[in-house]
Image (cartoon, rainbow, N blue to C red):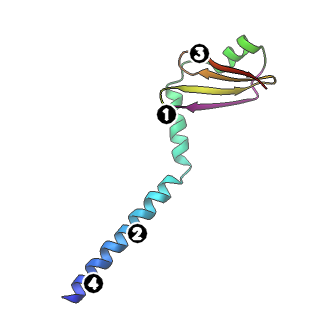
């Protein structure tokens, strides 16, 4: 009886450790970020390079697609400006001098 009880407890403990390890291992994979970026790109309806050219007349030095609660936006750096452009409507959310 003791052997069955001990083996049962060992099985529960080892399963808990494996499950815990798998969760943390999964959270650290860079492929999750790649999947998230692909998902965000599906909702993009604008070309940030055209809008940046219209507003500042400069080339893009750095571009990153980001999101907040209800907004998907591009963070764009040019030579003289930082721009945050809504990825669905094309509106400039924020414009700052560098």
According to the picture, the residue beneath numbered tag 2 turns out to be 17
Q: Give the range drawn in magenta.
A: 59-68
What residue appears at the point 48 percent right and 31 percent down from the top-left corner? 69
Image quadrant where residue 83 sits: top right
CA separation in Å, label 1 and label 2: 32 Å
Relative to 21, residue 67 above or below: above
Quadrant for the N terminus, please.
bottom left
SS assignment at label 4: helix
Q: Nearer the viewer, mark 1 or mark 3?
A: 3
Name of the residue lying farthest toward the left:
1
According to the picture, the residue beneath numbered tag 1 turns out to be 39
Relative to 47, residue 33 above or below: below
SS assignment at label 3: loop
Q: How crowded is mark 2: few (under 14 residues within 10 Å), some or many (20 or more)?
A: few
CA separation in Å, label 4 and label 2: 17 Å
CA separation in Å, label 3 and label 4: 63 Å
Relative to 69, residue 19 above or below: below
Q: Do the residues labelled 1 and 2 touch (CB within 8 Å)?
A: no
Image quadrant where residue 54 sits: top right
Dominant secondary structure, magenta? strand
**Along the polypeptide, which appears first: circle 1 or circle 3?**
1
- Could you say which disc has been placed on residue 6 in the image? 4
Q: Are marks 4 and 2 in contact (CB under 8 Å)?
A: no
What residue appears at the point 44 percent right and 58 percent down from the top-left corner? 23
According to the picture, the residue beneath numbered tag 3 turns out to be 90
């Amino acid at each position: 009886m003791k052997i069955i009880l001990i083996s049962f407890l060992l099985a529960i403990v080892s399963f808990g450790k494996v499950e815990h390890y798998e969760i943390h291992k999964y959270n650290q994979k860079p492929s999750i970020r790649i999947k998230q970026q692909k998902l965000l790109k599906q909702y993009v309806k604008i070309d940030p390079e055209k809008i940046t050219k219209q507003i500042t007349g400069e080339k893009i030095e750095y571009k990153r697609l980001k999101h907040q609660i209800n907004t998907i936006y591009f963070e764009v750096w040019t030579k003289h400006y930082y721009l945050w452009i809504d990825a669905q409507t094309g509106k400039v959310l924020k414009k700052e001098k560098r």
